[in-house]
Every structure is written in structure tokens, then in C-alpha cells.
Image (tube, rainbow, N blue to C red):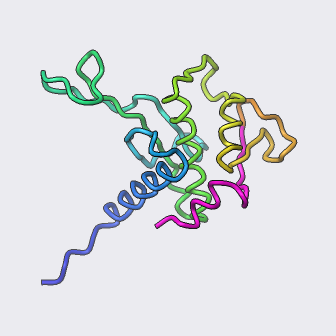
Amino acid sequence: MPAAVPSPTEDLWEAYSLAYEFLNDQLFDNALPNCILNFATHGRANAFFTLGRWQEQLADTPAAGANKKGRRQAHELSLNPVLLDGPVDKALAWIVRLMVQLHLHEKGNDYDYPQGYYSAEFTNAMWAIGLPCSSDGTPTGNRTGFTMNHWIDPAGKFAEAIKEIP
């Protein structure tokens, strides 16, 4: 019998997982935790990050990653599936943008800003990784606010990393 052909679902999730693992290694020194990688639409958003979206009740024995209530939580990184119809580097840039948000949270920077607000800390992290951003998508735009457009710096860490992505 011929080998079973992986389903489109298996192919998609494997590619997404491999991209996350590779980018975590190359850009974040494997500092980011495992999380739920998802595809969903949320208004007109290209992607969104949700803290602790997924939880599971654990058995009586505490397990790694469990909180005080005996639950394990996972953050969600979700891409709008429409990104899959465009250039791969654009989809990867959105994954990394979510990873930057996750990284800032993991560093303990739960700043008290309104939901959807992009702080200078976020913008500085994006610029440092090679995904500069501003309110209008230009180098002279505002670096904080509720709207943030990023672009790929061809000489940045992100552009270098994706040249090597499996």
C-alpha cells in the first residue's frame, strides 16, 4: 500500500509549528513558551495575540506550567487565514509580530495600556528585530498608538532569518 498522504490540515499545522519553532530559535533564543497556534478571523485584523486563552484542568498532581489553580494555560497566536494567500514573508512577519507581543509579556512587561495600544517598548522591540513599524508605515510616523503598520527591513534580523527557514 502507498504511504498515506498527509491531510491539508496536518501540512498546515506542521508548517506553522515549524515556522514558530524556527523563528523562536533564530530571533528569541528559544525564550518563548509553547503556545496555541491558530487561524481565525477577528474583524479586519491580520493577526491577534491573546494571553492565557487556552486552559486545561490538570490532574491532582501538579505538572510543569501549572498555575496555582491546577490549570495549565497557553497563550494564543492567531493569524487571519487570508494571509496564507499572500507572500510567505508577510505571513511570517505577522507571526513574529505576535511573538514580539508574547516576548514582552514573558519578560513581565504587562503594562497597563488600553487594549490594542502599541507602546514604545513594542515599537522598539519590532525595530530591533528588523520589523520597523509606525502609525503610518513610514520611518517618520508615530511610534506609539492604536494603529501600527510594520514593514520588513531587508538588512534586519528577520530578513536574514527567513532566508534560512526550512
The residue under the point 55% across, 44% down is 47
Q: Residue at x 75, y 30 (%)?
A: 144
Q: Residue furthest right?
A: 140
| 146 or 134: nearer the viewer | 134
Q: Is 150 within the magenta? A: yes
Q: Is 130 positioned to the left or the right of 107 in the image? A: right
* 4 falls in the magenta region: no
Farthest residue in the front direction? 29
Where residue 68 appears, as percent x and y from the top left, is 28, 15
Q: Residue furthest bottom?
A: 1
Which residue is depicted at the point 71% across and 39% down?
148
Give the x, y percent position of residue 3. 19, 79
141 vs 74, left or right, is right
Q: Is residue 4 above or below residue 111?
A: below
What is the quadrant of the N terminus in the image? Answer: bottom left
Residue 146: quadrant of the picture? top right
Image: 58 above or below 14: above
In screen coordinates, is 108 left or right of 136?
Answer: left
Q: Residue at x 52, y 61 (%)?
A: 84
Range of residues picked out in magenta: 148-166
Residue 92 is situated, as x and y percent measured from the top left of the image, at 56, 56
Q: How many marks?
A: 0
Quadrant of residue 118 within the rendered picture: top right
Q: Position of residue 109 (x, y in %)?
A: 56, 23
Left or right of 162, for residue 140: right
